[in-house]
Amino acid sequence: MKRILVTGAAGQIGTELVPALLARYEGGTVIATDIKEPVEPLPAGARFEPLDCTDGDACRRVVSDHGVDTIYHLAAILSAKAEGMPQRAWEVNSNGLYHVLEAAREAGCAVFTPSSIAAFGGGTPADPAPQDTIQRPGTIYGVTKVAGELLCDYYHARFGVDTRGLRYPGLISYVAPPGGGTTDYAIEIFHAALIEGRYTCYLQPDTQLDMMYMPDALRAAVELMDADADRLRHRNAFNVTAMQLTPARLADAIRVHLPDFEIGYAVDPTRQRIATSWPRRIDDGAARREWDWRPEYDMPAMVEDMLARLAPRLGVTSPVGA
């Protein structure tokens, strides 16, 4: 039976990954850890334990005490938030990963670690960004992600740790609130559309970025961890994507369902600078070839599902403009 540890379980991905793992591995156990308790109640088969991943002794203890065989290491400070606390971002994102990898090395665990399109930078080809290309990010978040990809490569080559990872695009979820990322507008816009009928976006209307709906993001992580290791060449940095959005394009898609929805713009220079440094589109051909990655949600399907599922969570029985 699988015994899985999830760090950052109260975050955007972790909140939904814990039940997804229990559904995938019937009879398994998931130890959900974070520095704070999850807002969403944990499903049967999961247990919460507080854990600060920057504490190496604590990481080793939790892995050993629970007989963990697989770690999904999600704890991180995201891009926009990290720019305001770069020293802390390095401590959490890089040193935290080091402690998790050390615990995995000692216990023989497999490790999944998400990277990001933030690992690219201004020198990366923008449309599309290849799987293998120059990576010179201009944010501390991106720097930690490049360092993390390389550190995972090292632990696999040097110590035989089964490390795997994805370069996620912006993620859209109806469950967890935005977590301080540059692509948070793609979640905030739905909340605003349903409650207020209008949204003021902090990015320019034509800022194109790759995005993915959370059900696809969860499935990608689990499918990668279940993939045949002999097929994997790009273990710790697979590009994955599902759709390319701009604020204006997403607003138009929402208006298909909420015709009276309005969008305005008040550009945040920091987030705009970050977004402009990322590719407009990434090439996920390696993931499609090496472990048969295919997204299930395009923009119209995502928007329809997001509105339908988010409305009852917000207590909206008659969405604005419906």
Image (spheres, rainbow, N blue to C red):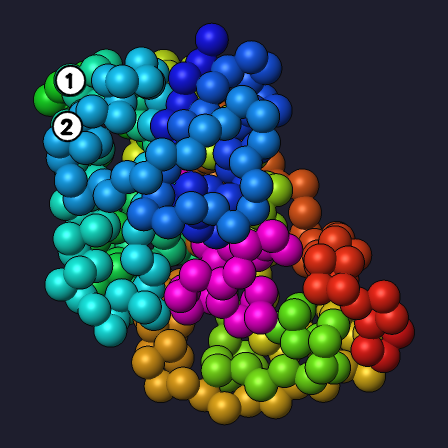
The image position of residue 161, as x and y in percent, is 22, 20
Q: Is residue 278 magenta?
A: no
Mark 1 residue type: Glu
From the viewer's perspective, is 39 left or right of 68?
right
Q: Is the Cβ of the residue at disc 1 closer than 8 Å to that at disc 2?
A: yes
From the viewer's perspective, is 300 left or right of 36?
right
**What residue is drawn where x is 45% and y is 29%?**
47
With respect to residue 204, does 84 lie above or below?
above
From the viewer's perspective, is 318 left or right of 300?
right
Count the labels in the image.
Answer: 2
Mark 2 residue type: Glu
Report the front residue among 125 and 213.
213
The image position of residue 133, as x and y in percent, is 28, 50
**Could you say which quadrant of the image residue 85 lies in?**
bottom left
**What residue is drawn where x is 48% and y is 58%?**
170
Span shown in magenta: 165-188
- Quadrant (top left, top right, bottom left, bottom right) of the C terminus: bottom right
Q: Which residue is mark 1?
A: 106
**Could you say which quadrant of the image residue 148 lies in?**
top left
The image position of residue 91, as x and y in percent, is 15, 53
Q: Is residue 170 magenta?
A: yes
With respect to residue 313, does 67 lie above or below?
above
Q: Which residue is mark 2?
A: 102
**What residue is drawn where x is 39% and y is 79%?**
272
With respect to residue 218, does 255 lie above or below?
below
User: Which SS class for mark 1?
Assistant: helix
Report the front residue among 90 and 9.
9
Label 1, label 2: how far apart the Cα atoms are: 6 Å
User: Which SS class for mark 2?
Assistant: helix
